[in-house]
Image (spheres, rainbow, N blue to C red):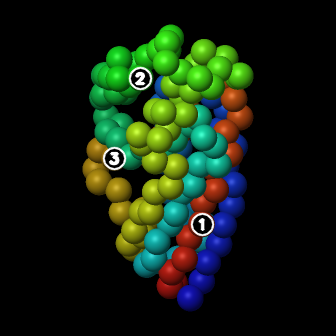
Amino acid sequence: MLQSSTRLGIATRGPGLYEFTRDLSDFVAASGIREGLVTVFCRHTSASLLIQENADADVQTDLQGFFRRLVPEGMDWIVHRTEGPDDMPAHIRSALTQTSIGIPVLEGAPALGTWQGIYLFEHRARPHRRDIVLHIIGES
């Protein structure tokens, strides 16, 4: 059994989806693992991960609009306001999505579907440098 891990730094410019499918695929290929599991982990509480369509940018626009409507800023019942008006909504959006995703590795590549990509979903208004951990385990 082989395993490997690395960290990716993803610079964000505000709310949105930031695709890093190519980085993930490159990591898997470099590991030499042909069959196994790659785990993707976001080390933050105000950003999350999504596997989503990467063929039509309208999907990203609609997802962002949905989350802005589902969890808007300015909810008067919010208590946690220490880091600004977008912080607690960002935590809620992150709680509704995921911070860890496991993806099977088949034939030396992530077993994503034809139109699937992996994204960091930034929920905060200001730019951030987000830390993603990749870990793969399997057989060559």
Q: Residue at x 46, y 33 (%)?
A: 93
> Quick check: can you spot residue 70?
yes
Closer to the camera: disc 1 or disc 3? 1
The answer to whether 59 appears left or right of 31 in the picture is left
Q: Which residue is mark 1?
A: 135
Identify which amino acid the numbered label 3 is placed on: Gln
Q: Residues within 10 Å of mark 2 (few under 14, many from 20)?
A: some
The reply to whether callout 3 and callout 2 are in contact (CB within 8 Å) is no
Of circles 2 and 1, the one toward us is 2
Q: Secondary structure at mark 1?
A: strand
Residue denoted by label 3 = 116
Which kind of residue does numbered mark 2 sit on?
Val
Which quadrant of the figure has residue 113? bottom left
Give the amino acid type for the residue marked by disc 1 in the picture: His
Mark 3 vs mark 2: in front: 2
Given residues 106 and 46, the one toward you in this image is 46
| C-alpha gap between disc 3 and disc 2 | 25 Å
The x and y percentages for residue 57 are 35, 25
